[in-house]
Amino acid sequence: MIKQAFFQGKNMRRRYFEGWYFKCISADRKHAIAIIPGMAIDPQGEKQAFIQVINAVNGKTWYHHFSYSEFKARSNRFDVEIENNSFNAEGLSLNVETREGSIKGRLTFEQIHPFPRGAKHPGIMGPFGIIPFMECYHAIIHLYHEIKGVIELDGEILDFNGGVGYIEKDYGRSFPKTYLWLQASHFEDGNASFVFSRANIPFLGFEFPGFFAYFTDFKEITRRFATYNFSRVEKWEVDTEKGTCAGELEGPNGSLAFSAQMAGGGRLRAPLDGLMDREIIESITAKVWVRLTNNQGDIIFESSSNEAGMEICMDEAVVSNQESQP
């Protein structure tokens, strides 16, 4: 079984990227940042390492560039180092001082809820996660963890003691041309984790629509909706100008309805054939509503979050598609 949190790019020579996404929300919800360490190799084989940062409060983003010689990552465990910065399942340590700005401090993670994996479900992508030659692979590492520590971002002290976080990663050649992504861990009615993504996926010269959604309250409720388990998108609406989306999913164990609204957002660099030249807008203070029902139609969870991650990169064909799809 592939350990997707580990470094996958050891033998890659060109057109490749790999990045780990750490989302951090403070206990008082006054601070929300995302930190993305990674590496990329362009079509000519030139390599680079980077650390991206987004501050949800003001929408400011930083792209800290490093020589690839400063990048070290293990292929047998989750352990990434870039110059004087380290990242793993237990926490992260930052000591960045570049012309773009500075970020320093250490965060440790406790009460970790990793994404459940096994032979039946190797990851959030299901069997697609082990098919070779996919354009992009997505993995969830931590659905939820608690945070201890303080970060100094361009001279501002951000206290994350008692806060919560989330870790995922992407690797491959390029982000999908067309996709939508949502992730929320802070809900008004208690701790829970929700993630959803829908994309047009190129594969061997063809393209097909695929999606996945995962929800858990870490107690009794866990639901997975995905193309590979014969779930369906029954309703689908996206307004790119307003930054909104809504959907209804039907699966083997019930249904899930959700809606989301972008709030704020900053510009991040995304990979295209290993070039970190594509710009995307990401919000990590989006508003998300989720309702989960069982097969009998009973509501088993309904709540909202104001600290959700959200990206919309949709083309006209997907935006206007309201039909059910497998």
Image (spheres, grey):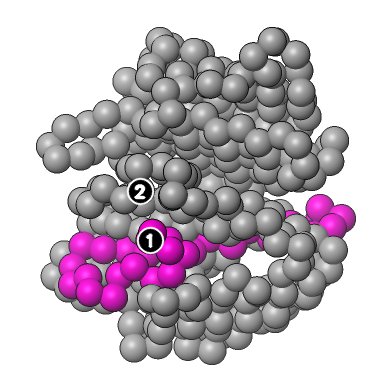
Residue 233 appears in the picture as rendered: yes
Classify residue 205 as left or right of residue 179.
left
Q: Are marks 2 and 1 in contact (CB under 8 Å)?
A: yes
Q: Which residue is depicted at the point 53% across and 21% down?
A: 252
The vertical placement of 235 against 202, above or below, is above
Q: Which residue is depicted at the point 57% across and 74% down?
A: 88
Foreground residue among 1 and 192:
1
Which amino acid, by three-letter code, is at mark 2?
A: Gly
Q: Which residue is mark 2?
A: 129
Q: Which residues are magenta?
A: 1-30
The vertical placement of 20 against 264, above or below, is below
Q: Residue 285, percent across and down?
A: 68, 45
Crowd rating for badge 1 (residues with CA inside 10 Å; few <14, some 14–19, many 20+): few
Q: Residue 306, percent across and down?
A: 74, 39
- Which labelled disc corresponds to residue 2? 1
The vertical placement of 17 against 242, above or below, is below
Crowd rating for badge 2 (residues with CA inside 10 Å; few <14, some 14–19, many 20+): some
